[in-house]
Amino acid sequence: MSVQALKKIKITEALNTNIWDVDSRPHITVDYEKCRKLCDKKICTLLCPAGCYTLSDDGILFSYEGCLECGTCRIVCPHEAVKWDYPLSGRGVQYRFG
């Protein structure tokens, strides 16, 4: 396959081709108290590739349903406010490309 034959797509289009079998038990928990008191940068809102973390007036909001299970949030949190575990067996994201 030639390079010219490859179609460029936006990341949001690629993510829409994946399938999520959402676990009823969140595989990520956030210590919102730590986040609110200790963190002024809220770096998780900038680095989560799925956009699961958003800013609100009270701090951050987190939604695990669209999580890509990359673990970025756990690694970048300077205060260890994010506890991350794998979803139950067979649950979570199923990638179609790559």
Image: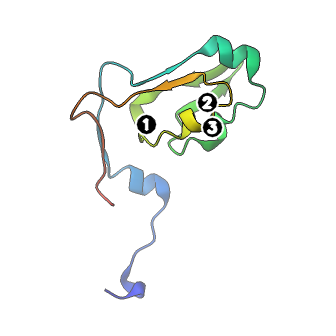
Q: Residues within 10 Å of mark 1 (few under 14, many from 20)?
A: many
Left or right side of 48 for 1: left
Residue 93 or 78: which is nearer the viewer?
78
Residue at the image position 61 percent from the left and 24 percent from the top: 80
How far is the residue under mark 1 from the one under mark 2?
13 Å
Of pointers 2 and 3, the one earlier in the residue sequence: 2
Residue 37 percent across, percent down from the top left: 74, 14
**Three-letter amino acid code at disc 2?**
Thr
Q: Residues within 10 Å of mark 3 (few under 14, many from 20)?
A: some
**Is the C-beta separation of discs 2 and 3 under 8 Å?**
no
Q: Secondary structure at mark 2?
A: strand
Instruction: Tell me if residue 16 comes above or below residue 35 in the rendering.
Output: below
Q: Is residue 22 left or right of residue 31?
A: left
Q: Which mark is residue 67?
A: 1
Of tags 2 and 3, the one toward the viewer is 3
In the image, residue 3 sits, relative to residue 39, either above or below, namely below
Q: Image check: 16 left or right of 70?
A: left
- The residue singled out by tag 3 in the image is 76
Dot label at residue 24: none
User: Which residue in the structure is indicated by mark 2?
Assistant: 54
Q: x%, y% of residue 92?
A: 31, 35
Amino acid carrying mark 1 in the image = Cys
Q: Position of residue 98 (x, y in %)?
A: 33, 61
